[in-house]
Image (cartoon, rainbow, N blue to C red):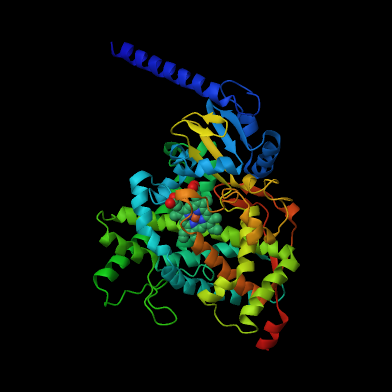
Amino acid sequence: MYFTILCCYLLYRLIQRLLEWRRQWCMIEKLPGPELENTFIGNIKETVVAPEDVPKESIRRFKTWGGIYRTWILGYPFVFISDAKYAEVFFTAKAVETKADIYRFLHVWVGLGLLNSRGETWQRRRKMIAPAFHFSALSDFCQVFINNTLTLVQQLRKNRDGTPVEVFSKMRLLALDNICEIAMGFKVDALNNPNHDYIRAVEDVSHMVMQRIVKPWYWNDLIFFLLPEGRKHWRDLNTIFELTDKAISNGKQKRTNKNSKISKEPDSKLEEDDDVGRKKSAFIDILLQASETDSIKLTDEDLRDEVNTFMFGGFDTAANSMSFTLFLLGLHPEIQEKCYQELYDIFQDSDRRPTMGDLQKMTYLEKVIRESLRLFPSVPMLGREVTQDVQLGDYIIPKNSLLALPVYTLHRDPTVFPDPDKFDPERFNPEEAAGRHPYAYVPFAAGPRHCIGQKFALLEEKVTLSYILRDFTLESEHGMEDLELMFTLVVRSRKPLNVRFKRRKHCQQSES
Ligand code: HEM
């Protein structure tokens, strides 16, 4: 009897799936795309390529099929869009709000923090977190960027024989120092102490998240966490959580007894004063304060998720962008010189610290950063699940399809960015940018779920790059053609990004 009911139920589900599949098929097959290789596996052989082949393959498909095309993988339709008019729907339609399954590999680290939360929870959290990115908070954070950049510059100065520096690993350490101090109030001093347990754990966890995306045998949680790699992943996550939890309890203690001295750890301390003697808050303090005034309080788990989201969102993305910008400047001495002239107009030969006003004047440097993010968007591909049928131009995309937006390809559309592989910051001159479709350039995403850390990241990059350019000239060891880009959650170069930092003459003279 039970067996019959079970069989009927399974048959019903099978028929339901077949009908849905037929409906999807009729709608999806109107889109251009490769011929179906196999009814069951679909176009898996053509679509799933090694991470290092994705950038080239993505451009090739765009040239072959245009700004919208479909492929099938294991019976599921995937729709790829690289046209600004479709990107607008991607970022604004309610039917395309749900993040793609790929984000689940992050759950163990960032839980349901801002990046992964949805609906009302997301709306409330976004409102609660927004003050952490307001001007006054950002100018506090700026002091942290400056102090850590000075440590980096000191290290680069010691490299007197001009040995090339692998910028990606350096910028990761700098970005980690910035984000740990700002998110949690802890100084981990990764630049001087790259083997710190927490630093190693963050590095290893983010590496493993990327590995899980590209290795299907890591996809199932149950199997993965039984493997030695999975068990190590857990241990690393626990190392991260220990420090986050300590930051939360320190933050709470600080709020309940504002005048009491905060206990100092041997390898970490809470930063209380900035350089002008004003009290400064870490992200966690701002969250705790917001949670006290909000009708729905954040639990310790919510706080942990938000701090870890802040850490994840703000570390690799910014490090990547700074690294590619240094690399591009090292390949384009004339653009580098223009940046230096802008900085010279602001600072002359002085080595004073930049003010927020100075940073706002660095308009050419900002164009350089934006152009670098066009060529190498830190988040190269975005994915959403379609939860209701949605209209994309002449096509209707059925629910339960996956919509992918390769930002990398969108940014290289030659009809929007002529000579798209050329590094040309002038593209961001106001008059050139004015006529452009608002969704043609989206390194920080767009619409309601755009990156909350955009201003934070631009400020961090301006501080670091301006200090470096005031002190050094840059020469990249490799050319663009040597890059072996690969897409994981962030864009990476498989080859090291080696750059030579040579002291500017006037800097050497003023020291001697
Ligand atoms: C160059 C640096 C950065 C780039 C290119 C970047 C890019 C992005 C992109 C593309 C998204 C959307 C992801 C999606 O929809 O799937 C995003 C979301 C987000 N980013 Fe960033 N990001 C950067 C820096 C930062 C920083 C510094 C922080 C925090 C300190 C941060 C925190 C976040 C958060 C919390 C979200 C989720 C926002 C939401 O869903 O409401 N990001 N970022």
Judge from the rendering whether residue 419 lies leftward or rightward of residue 142; answer left or right. Answer: right
Residue 384 drawn at (x, y percent): 49, 39
With respect to residue 340, does 51 lie above or below? above
The answer to whether any part of residue 178 appears in the image is yes
With respect to residue 8, does 26 lie above or below? below
The answer to whether any part of residue 194 appears in the image is no
Name the residue rendered at 67%, 87% in the picture.
510
Name the residue rendered at 70%, 71% in the picture.
338
Judge from the rendering whether residue 396 lies leftward or rightward of residue 512; answer left or right. Answer: left
Name the residue rendered at 30%, 64% in the picture.
289
Please tell me in which quadrant of the rendered image residue 480 appears.
bottom right
In front: 125, or 270? 125
Query: Which residue appears farthest toward the bottom when viewing the image?
Result: 512
Please tell me in which quadrant of the rendered image residue 25 appears.
top right
Please tell me in which quadrant of the rendered image residue 85 appears.
top right
Judge from the rendering whether residue 394 lies leftward or rightward of residue 62; answer left or right. Answer: left
